[in-house]
Amino acid sequence: MTTVVTENCKGCRFTDCVAVCPVACFHYDDEMLYIDPDVCIDCSACIPECPVEAIFEEDDLPEGQEQWIEINAEKAPDLPLIEEPMEALPEAEERKADLGF
Amino acid sequence: MSSLGDESSPLRVAIVGSGPSGFYATEALIKSGLNIEIDLIERLPAPYGLVRNGVAPDHPKLKQAIEVYKKVAKNPEFNFVGNVTVGVDIKAEDLQQTHHAVMYTCGAETDRRLGIPGEDLPGSHTATEFVGWYNGHPDYRDRTFDLSHETAVVIGQGNVAADVARILAKSVDELKHTDIAQHALDVLAESRVRTIYVVGRRGPAQAKFASKELKEFLEIENCRPYIAPEELELNPASQEEINSKEGRGNKKNVEIFHRFADSEDTGKQRICIATFLKSPQRLEGEARLQKVVFETNALTGEPFRQSARGTGQTMEIECGILFRSIGYNGVPVPGVPFYERWGTIPNEAGRITAEQDGPVVPGLYTAGWIKRGPSGIIGTNRACAVESVEALLEDIDQLNTDRPGREGLYKILDNNGVRHINFAQWEKIDTAEVAAGEPKSKPREKFTRQSEMLAVAES
Ligand SMILES: Cc1cc2nc3c(=O)[nH]c(=O)nc-3n(C[C@H](O)[C@H](O)[C@H](O)COP(=O)(O)OP(=O)(O)OC[C@H]3O[C@@H](n4cnc5c(N)ncnc54)[C@H](O)[C@@H]3O)c2cc1C
Ligand SMILES: NC(=O)c1ccc[n+]([C@@H]2O[C@H](COP(=O)([O-])OP(=O)(O)OC[C@H]3O[C@@H](n4cnc5c(N)ncnc54)[C@H](OP(=O)(O)O)[C@@H]3O)[C@@H](O)[C@H]2O)c1
Ligand code: SF4
Ligand code: SF4
């Protein structure tokens, strides 16, 4: 079991999730965040914090999103760590509205 | 003129309580980059608060949060002062004289009461005691739990209630390779409990379980989770709740409850029954608990604000043991403001106030459960501690500058004849626990007496 960030985080990157992560396992690139499955303790603290419902427990992933398990696992370890919330991407609010949130 | 936190004048902070909030406050202070000295004071010889003494033994992954705290403890700014109870071994007022700032992160260590007749009958316990006991907390080492009766009742439907029910439901084989205390394992091995009721005062859509906790019940080897299907009929307001965005988690819970209702009787040894809309009215028994009398409830109010109203009708459950799991409560530290009603230290975003909505007391801060009340998971305390540390750092120029810090603290403790241990000594205890667990294939066998821990620490 692990917890994964999915598509919805793209181009949005509100970082509300990061503030409550007890073990600092979020990493980021220009687009979005990824969870390092080797560090994440599956506490679920981040899930309700995400304003665009981008985070899921592995066995709770909506159909067609399974590829994100691998993407998170592959990308996270080599990317920089994010421990404190940072500013959302400029187009974040717009994207949030587009996603229907 | 130099100011606190400069190279020449370290900011000296005492933090009281080494659970998650104490460690996250320490981490945030260190990250400020200031010249800082932190003394993390803990009443037990062992650090980590409820991560060690609350989180269930069969959830080892969550305890990995400790790895983060170990890293924090490696910083040269950090000093652990274990086996020291603030308010007993050193006065809160004295601590204010030794450090520039004091932050209380002492958690919520007692429980709420139901306030009903029979609550103190033998056989009626709190989840707090049971959890402390199976986790080897020294305060609860000598509690006894009589599991010789077939029926157990858990009052409350939060995650702690789920932990208690799950520990009662699991077989010893499912627990014996965890860090559960040996004395608890021995008693659970003899358990004759067959039926466990988990009783909520409101409905299925209002239960506070995390869905993940609920799902686990479907995987217990020898226990069938069950709900009478008719109990899952929802009133319109509850329907509305689970269909809205904020009700995402509750909706999942209701879905899992339906799986409980559909579960087949495959002859498992135990059954765990969730039941709703019942408030305990009194506990009855001669000499010891024999039954609980409930008043049945109906929900009234707007969606998300529904409360339970008694219908005047009652029902009974015969049982031999009961655990009330209706929430924790803060314990006042003598000399520190306390708001009885909420069981918290009154504060404004982490700055302690003389009373609820009163003026700020300079130099005093708080974080974690004692600041917010007993809710939220491990990570919640990180954001909470960061907020409190931000307040402290904003106030830095107003703090009293003349404080001896560590040296002054140790002087008082030594004058008071208090035995205290540092982090290296705790690490000795830690190593000894891990070694003691090894022959039993347990991650550790905890010491459950303070005297044993101190003997190892001082060896
Ligand atoms: C039974 C149970 C199970 C839980 N399971 C989970 C879980 O699975 N996942 C999850 O994310 N969260 C879980 N939680 C919630 C989590 O444990 C809390 O959110 C968190 O521990 C609160 O942190 P804290 O630092 O405020 O308090 P605590 O962890 O309680 O730490 C307070 C510390 O202060 C010390 N102290 C108290 N008074 C004094 C004093 N006067 N002087 C010196 N020291 C003092 C105590 O000994 C303790 O070490 C659980 C909680 C409980 C009760
Ligand atoms: N695995 C985990 O993540 C985990 C494990 C354990 C604990 N924790 C966290 O630790 C915190 C504390 O958990 P908790 O279970 O102690 O608290 P909680 O989640 O607040 O649950 C308390 C339960 O007691 C009920 N209750 C309160 N007063 C009552 C009364 N007078 N009569 C009958 N029922 C009453 C509440 O019902 P109402 O809803 O009607 O008030 C609720 O069902 C929570 O935030 C929890 O999530 C997390
Ligand atoms: S809160 Fe959600 S959208 Fe924002 S960074 Fe975290 S996962 Fe991405
Ligand atoms: S589940 Fe917990 S540990 Fe994992 S990323 Fe989310 S907050 Fe961090």
Image (tube, coloured by chain):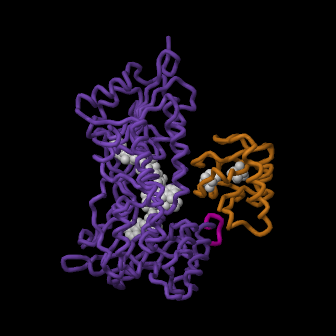
B188 part of magenta stretch: no
Which quadrant: the C terminus of chain A? Answer: bottom right
Q: Residue drawn 41% across and 76% down?
A: B309
| Residue B87: quarter of image | top left
Q: Residue B104 in the image: x percent, y percent?
A: 40, 40
- Reply above or below: B440 against B29: below
Q: Residue B163 in the image: x percent, y percent?
A: 46, 66
> Closer to the camera, A49 or B300?
A49
Give left or right: position of A53 versus B190.
right
Q: Residue A41 in the image: x percent, y percent?
A: 59, 54
- Reply above or below: B10 against B380: above
Give left or right: position of B240 versus B405.
right
Q: Colour of chain A?
A: orange
Kindly tell me whether residue B357 is visible in this rendering.
Answer: no
Q: Residue drawn 45% across and 66% down?
A: B176
- The span picked out in magenta is B241-247
Q: How many marks?
A: 0
Which quadrant: the N terminus of chain A? Answer: bottom right
> Closer to the camera, B220 or B453?
B453
B244 part of magenta stretch: yes
Q: Residue drawn 62% across and 45% down?
A: A24
Kindly tell me whether residue B294 is visible in this rendering.
Answer: yes
| Residue B171: quarter of image | bottom left
Give left or right: position of A21 versus B282.
right
> Closer to the camera, B391 or B271?
B271
Q: Colour of chain B?
A: purple
Q: Residue A34 in the image: x percent, y percent?
A: 73, 50
